[in-house]
Image (cartoon, rainbow, N blue to C red):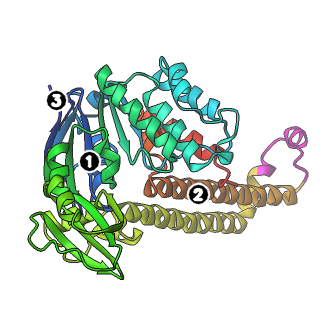
Amino acid sequence: MAAIKVKDLTKDYGSVPGVDSLSFTVDNGEIFGFLGPNGSGKTTTIRTLLGLLTPTAGTATILGADVREENALIEAKRRIGYLPADLGFNDDVTGTQVLEYHASVKGDSRRTGLLDVFTPPLDQQIREYSTGNKQLLGIIQAFMHDPDLVIMDEPTSGLDPLNQAQFNEFINAERERGTTIFFSSHVLSEVRRVCDRVGILRDGRLVGLENMEALLERGGKRVHVRVADGSNVDLTATDGVFDRTTIGDEQQFTYAGDYTTLIRQLADYQIHDIEITEPPLEDIFMHYYGERKGSRALDRERKPMFETARYEARRRLRGTAGLVAILSVYVGFMTGLYRAINIEAYGEIINAVPASLREALGIVDLSVVEGWLAAEVYYFFWIWVLGIYFGYTAAGLITDDIEHDRLDLLLSFPFSRSRLLREILGAVRADPRVE
């Protein structure tokens, strides 16, 4: 059984397309790279696989669980590690506290061994962490419960070269342990060292699905050459040369042919400088999959908020909160007005109360009742105002966190809806933005 199986998966944000008819599988024990430029739909795919988004059409299974079936997905999440693009850690806690919380939810059988490889400053508060240290802490929490499947969104983002090398070595060791790893990236050199296969995503569509060797052959290398006497290198008869440009005395081109042939051609010149690098992923897309006719990246994951369904949810929540607040003021005012008009009726009722009971209650004359009524109206009014303010603020913070993916890690936990709601409300109450 495949660890991940996707069939005709589509996700739309209303009129805004996210991903369109994706179909692929990830085998058990495989390291699968999900490549694409920023905004191509990688994060949307990951969030849909984890049940954070509901598919518009099609289906997907992850460790045998249908992503549309909540109970089955909750069980599967116990065997999944997740590293989101935005970790959303609380700035006021230490790294140790973060790991303790994750351990209480998922377990931590591998924590000690992981801390021998990755060394974030656990005693410091998260607000003091560099981007790289936050990423290291995120990698530890993703693997510490020994999951069968780990899903990572841009895992080396923010890591320095030394930590990137350690991460690559660690991922190769995980392959030997049989862990299935699915991670997204927009950097070809990041995945070429560790991946078995890659899926290439562009504008929400899967445009390529191949092993790394085939991808590297198709992508070639980017070559920068400077000849000592400033002359041009004549490679017009050499197969595999394309995208050739000249900038000053430097010639640049992409080469996808036999490298021995290229070296023999260059041996006829006195080379002053030569640099051979991986071509940008976008160059591979443009050469092999057609030039992009106007980037639609912003139409997908980075569309302005007023174009997304999540913003619509926020707008409606706040609009409803505002309407309820206005109605509360109106009801409070009308209640007070009604009771003021009928103060004499209240007086008649009070006068019917035995004198001894009125004295025990502190009711001497009608002015006391008027004070009670006024206090009751204000009490009624302020309870509603404070309730609406907190609800408005909480709804705004939650939807803002969802909009910016800060709740992704929490949403990926194996929680029921009621447990998840309690965790989110607890986070809101502790949020310094709630005054």
Kind of element beneath mark 3: loop
Label 2, residues with CA under 10 Å away: few <14, some 14-19, many ≥20:
some
Q: Which residue is mark 2?
A: 393
Q: Which residue is mark 1?
A: 34
Q: Is the N terminus in the top left, top right, bottom left or bottom right quadrant? A: top left
Report how far apart the C-alphas of labels 2 and 1 lie in the structure: 37 Å
Comparing marks 1 and 3, which lies closer to the viewer? 1
Q: Residue at x 13, y 69 (%)?
A: 290
Label 3, residues with CA under 10 Å away: few <14, some 14-19, many ≥20:
some
Three-letter amino acid code of the residue under disc 3: Ala
Q: Residue at x 35, y 73 (%)?
A: 228
> Which residues make up the magenta segment?
350-364
Q: Residue at x 15, y 71 (%)?
A: 235
Camera-side residue of 21 and 232: 232
Task: Evaluate whether residue 258 shows in this view.
Answer: yes
Name above or below for residue 415 compared with residue 397: above
The location of residue 385, given as percent across then percent down, is 64, 60
Comparing marks 2 and 1, which lies closer to the viewer? 1
Which badge, 2 or 1, is on the more N-terminal residue?
1
Q: Is residue 257 left or right of residue 344?
A: left
Q: Is the C terminus in the top left, top right, bottom left or bottom right quadrant? A: bottom right
The location of residue 57, given as percent across then percent down, is 15, 51
